Image (spheres, rainbow, N blue to C red):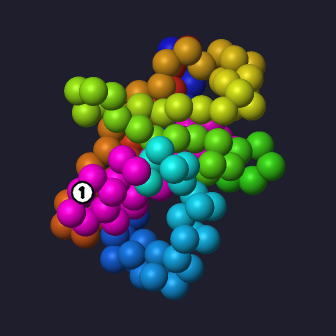
Amino acid sequence: MIKGIGVDAVQIDRFRRAMGRWGKRFLNRLFSENEMEECRKWKDPVPHLAVKFAAKEAFSKAMGTGFGAMLSPRELEVLHDASGVPRFAVSEKIKRQLKVRKIENIFLSLSHDGGLGIAFVIMEG
């Protein structure tokens, strides 16, 4: 049974401007070192960071909480397995919330093209 659906789109140039304005402080509020390291492998890491942020927003929408006291972007990591499949790694706090909501599987799809980063999340239980 589907327990939640979330989608988010990010303008990559807008994300790039925010990075330029706020620098490392901006990145450290949103991403783990693992996430940033994964993106540094690319010639231009910004589209990859932007779509990871979109994934976190889509997750918060699927949970129905948004970001705030119950959920912080740093409590979610968007990483890729050896085959390149994106997945979430979540904090213990989020694991507890998922268990309470009886969410057993989380599906994530990412794409970026034409200046947009898009993420789609389905939560199943």
Image coords of residue 56 (percent x, y):
52, 48
Q: Image check: 25 left or right of 119?
A: right
Residues rendered magenta in the picture: 37-65
Image coords of residue 28 (percent x, y):
59, 61
Image coords of residue 64 (percent x, y):
65, 41
Give neighbour class at mark 1: few <14, some 14-19, many 20+ (Cα, 10 Å): few
Q: Is residue 119 above or below residue 40?
A: above
Q: Residue at x 34, y 65 (%)?
A: 46
- Position of the C terminus, as image quadrant, is top right
Q: Residue furthest bottom?
A: 21
User: Which of the 4 quarters of the picture holds residue 96?
Assistant: top right
Judging depth in this view, the residue of 44 and 66 nearest the camera is 44
Under mark 1, the amino acid is Trp
Most common secondary structure along the magenta stretch: helix
Q: Residue at x 56, y 25 (%)?
A: 3
The residue tagged 1 is: 42
All told, the count of numbered labels is 1
Residue 107 within the segment the image draws in magenta: no
Q: Residue at x 27, y 53 (%)?
A: 41
Q: Is residue 101 above or below residue 113?
A: above
Q: Image check: 34 left or right of 38?
A: right
The answer to whether one can see residue 67 in this image is: yes
The answer to whether one can see residue 66 in this image is: no
Q: Image check: 62 left or right of 13?
A: right
Q: Image check: 112 left or right of 35?
A: left
Instruction: Tell me the SS state at disc 1.
Output: loop
Image coords of residue 113 (percent x, y):
20, 60
